[in-house]
Structures are given as C-alpha cells and as structure tokens.
Amino acid sequence: MRYSETITIEDLDTDPFPHYARLRAADPIAPVPAANCWFATRWSDIEQIARHPDFTAVSDEAPVNAAFGRPNVLTCEGETHAALRGGIEPHYRPRRVAEYIDSLVRPIAEAQLAAFRASGSNDLLTEYFEPISALALARSFGFMEVDTPTLRRWFHGLSQGAINFERYPARDAICQEVVAEIEHVALPLLERLAKTPDHSPLSHMLHSGMEPGQVRSAEMILPSVKVTLLGGMQEPGHGAANLLVGLMQNPAQFTALRADLDALLPQAIDEALRWIAPIGTMMRTATRDTQVNGVKVPEGTPVSCIFASANRDETRWDNADAFDIFRPQKAHMSFGQGAHFCAGKWFAKAQIEVAMRVLLDGFPHLAFADDPPEFRGWEFRAPTHCRVAL
Ligand code: HEM
C-alpha cells in the first residue's frame, strides 16, 4: 500500500506537516483516500496545476458547492468567474484598502481590546482576533448591522460545510442552519440594494457590469457571498493568531519585532502566513488523462493542491519548518495560485497589521498562559486558543 493511502484525517488535523514532508520527498502527487482526493505537495507541481490547461476549478466534488450552492466564484471559470469576482475585488485592491483600513479597523480593534480587558477571558483568539476579523469584513462588505457573536457563529458554521470532504451529515447540518440564517439576513438587504445601490461590495455584486435597470439575481451571487464571508471573516483573524503564537514561541524575534515594528511587522505577517497557511488547500480536477511533472493523473481526478506543504518545500526555503521573521523574503502560496488568487490579500494583511499594532500598544508584555496552544486542522489551520498570561 502507498504511504499516502494510510494517512487519516485525524493525522492531518493533528499535524499534517510530517506527512506532507514524506509525500514531497517520495510521492508528491498521490491519492489520499481518507480525503476523497489526491494530494499535490510540491511547490513546483502546484504552480503547474494552477495554470495547467488540463485542470479546472470547476468541480462537482468541491464541498463549497454542496454547502453554499452554485455558481460559486471559487468553482467557476470564464465570464461567470469574472462577473462574480468583479463585484468583490475593486473594494479590496491595495490603493483602495490603504484609503480606509485604518479608519475601519482601528476603532474596531480598540473597542475589542477594551472588551477583552473587561471580559475576564484571557483568550485573544476568541475575544480579540476573531471578532476583529469578522466585524472588519462584514462592515466592509455591506453587512452593517449583524453583531459579532452572530458573525463568528456564521463563519464557524460555514467552515463546517467548506471542509466537509468526508461528507459528514452532522457537519452539513451545522452549515445549512447558518446558511439559512445568512439568507434570511441577506435577501432583504439585497432587495434594498437592488433599488438603492451603495458603495459596498454587496451592492457592487448586484449592479457591476449590468445594463441600466438590470441587477444580478440573489441566487447568482449568494454562493459567492457565503464564500467571501467565510474566508474574509475567518482567515485574517486566524493568520493574526498564528503570528502571535509564532512570536510568543520565539521570544527573541518578538523582542526584535517590538523594537522596530515599522520595519519588521509586514514581513512577520507574511512569515506567519507562510509558516501556517490558514487555508491549506485548493481543489482542481483533471479534465482529461494528463501528466504533471511526469506523474500520470487520470481524467476526473480531484487534486488537492496543498499550499501549506508548498510553503514548507525544502527546495524553496532553508529550515522551512521554523518560524523566522528574518528569513529572506519570497512569495508564499497562502493566498493561492492562478486565476482564483485571493481577492482579499491586501485587506487581510493590512487588517492584521492594525490589529497587531493596537494589541502590542495595549500590552507591552505578552506571553502564553500556563497551557500553550496547539494547532489543529489541515484545510483550515489555526491555534485551538491563544490564552495569554495577564
Ligand atoms: C489571511 C487571510 C486570507 C487567506 C489566507 C486567504 C486565502 C485564500 C486562498 C488560498 C484563496 C484561493 C482558494 C482556491 O483557489 O481554492 C482565496 C480566495 C478568495 N479569497 Fe481569500 N484569504 C484571506 C482573506 C480574504 C479576505 C479578507 C477576503 C475578503 C474580501 C477574501 C476573499 C476571497 C475571495 C472572494 C476568494 C475567491 C477568489 C476567486 O475565486 O477568484 N479572502 N483566499
């Protein structure tokens, strides 16, 4: 039996990196039956698959289709993809983000820090990073009135659907409950925005590129709204938490960062995203019998491109498993590859920067509480908590 066929979901959820290393070394494009797909684990193979004419993002297998519906920005191509992405992307381009990020995120972060101090909790994951991430995305996207606990429940529920490669009914049920709740809030909002547009991405998704007097239907855009809510609310907070854990595990780097935040914070954020990719995978399907770097892949094979593994590829980085904010800077894959590259990269990184600055200003000394966090997950990976000594 191939080693890849022995890997279990529990192995991956606990610590996928030793398994990825073994696959990169000996069997880099290989079936993993437990995940119902093949894994591509080397940087160069994933680069190829993302641009390969024999692979498509269109998939009947992708959990996001079953969970959120179609057409879905992540799993469509061509004109439909351009139309859906075109409604979201302009608001999150770097120059646009620079205009509003501080005035959007700083007040949220300051209020959240005050709430954290008052909460009696010492968990910065649940009381600081996740709320900021959820609120910043929701407010920037056009959901102005949904409160933080609801938003956090939404992304936790949506993530249960997005990772449901194993098709567990219990996960699906959690996701569908949240989906119904989101539609209950979104449908009247979309109806209002259809008549009275504003500058939000939600409004733009309805109106951009349409003939005067026409709008896209709610059915057309809702699956992509759910994808953006999930990734946009969940990942920046988890990326920020990964960074804080990396820093607390490496106190000398933490001290150096505090001494020169302006110079070091941007590269520290990228290093945290490289070290632990918050979104570990992207699914592509072979449209015909094909080959990648000499490995035969049969038509119809779903191949999970493991960004988290590419980010640790020893042919690209020295000592790749180590968190090192001083390593020579090179692009990582945590925001994806190819046509579906993350639409929120600049927003996410700028938001993490503001959240970290507010936190470090407020807490000149941060260290773990008694029980240091573990990381969990492989499609989505994050610390189980981020409890600090107060
Ligand atoms: C650290 C934070 C984030 C990470 C690590 C991340 C990662 C990714 C990755 C890996 C993909 C590609 C997935 C694939 O091809 O299957 C993606 C796509 C996407 N992301 Fe992000 N993301 C982050 C934050 C955000 C934010 C804040 C937004 C909000 C605008 C966002 C919106 C999207 C959208 C709309 C797509 C789909 C793009 C397309 O299919 O064309 N992401 N993201």
Image: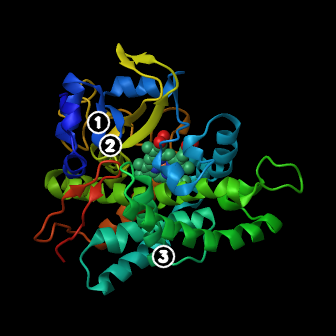
Using residue 105 as the reference point, say whether residue 386 is left or right of it. left
- Marked residue nearer the N-terminal end (2 or 3): 2
Instruction: Give the residue at x 43% y 67%.
Output: 174
Real-space Cα separation, disc 1 to disc 3, in angstroms = 35 Å
Q: Secondary structure at mark 1?
A: strand
Find disc 3 in the rendering and name its residue: 150
Instruction: Give the residue at x 24% y 40%.
Output: 326
Is the Cβ of the residue at disc 2 closer than 8 Å to that at disc 3? no
Is the Cβ of the residue at disc 1 closer than 8 Å to that at disc 2? yes
Within 10 angstroms of label 2, few (less than 14), some, or many (20 or more) residues?
Answer: some
Is residue 177 visible in the rendered structure shown here? Answer: yes
Find disc 2 in the rendering and name its residue: 35
Q: Amino acid at mark 1?
A: Val
Vertical placement of residue 352 versus 310, above or below: below
Say which of 229 and 130 sits in front: 229
- Where does residue 113 sit, x and y in percent of width and height? 36, 76
Q: Secondary structure at mark 3?
A: helix
